[in-house]
Image (tube, rainbow, N blue to C red):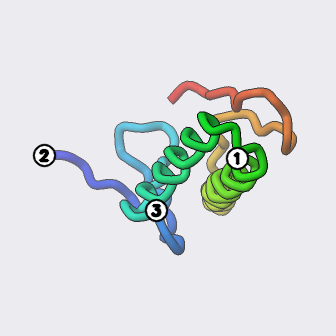
Amino acid sequence: MHDSAKILEIGANGAVVQLPERRFPGIVIQGDSLSILLSDFCDLKELIAKGEQSEMQACLASIEDHLRERVAFYESVLAKHGIELPYVRHKRGANKRMQRTRR
């Protein structure tokens, strides 16, 4: 028998959940939101191939906004529950990847 996941908080298009075998919570994204994100990436790939600079920037901004909203929701839920982040936060616009903390 498997232990159940604990829902820490439900948001507009997803939830933060704690799986019993994981040190840090994860985020669940609704299928339609995930599909939209993939579609945006596919659009971006086509725009890059065509060299359409202004459209690329708009598409990238949309993807960034979507991901930033998810990360902000995740971080606020972890803060409410007194859980450390599984990565080191970097300043907006930094070209560094978020460093992971071991699970």
Q: Is residue 94 left or right of residue 2?
A: right
Q: Residue 98: image x %, image y %?
A: 70, 32
Q: Amino acid at mark 2?
A: Met
Residue at 40% over, 64% down: 32
Asked where in the image residue 100 lies, by quadrant, the reply is top right
Residue lying farthest left? 1
Q: Which mark is residue 1?
A: 2
Closer to the camera, 33 or 77? 33
**Marks 1 and 3 in Cβ contact (< 8 Å):** no
The nearer-to-camera label among 1 and 3 is: 1
Closer to the camera, 87 or 79? 87
Q: Which residue is mark 1?
A: 56
Q: CA distance from mark 2 to mark 1?
A: 48 Å
Answer with mark 1 or mark 3, whichever residue precedes in sequence.
3
- Neighbor class of circle 2 (other Cα within 10 Å; few <14, some 14-19, many 20+) is few
Q: Amino acid at mark 3?
A: Ser
Q: Residue 55: image x %, image y %?
A: 71, 52
Asked where in the image residue 70 lies, by quadrant, the reply is bottom right
Closer to the camera, 23 or 71? 71
Q: Relative to residue 29, is residue 22 depicted above or below?
A: above
Q: Relative to residue 9, is residue 92 depicted above or below?
A: above
Kind of element beneath mark 2 = loop
Residue at 43% over, 51% down: 18
Residue 27 in view of the camera? yes
Q: Residue 87: image x %, image y %?
A: 67, 34
Q: Which mark is residue 33?
A: 3
Q: Residue 68: image x %, image y %?
A: 69, 54
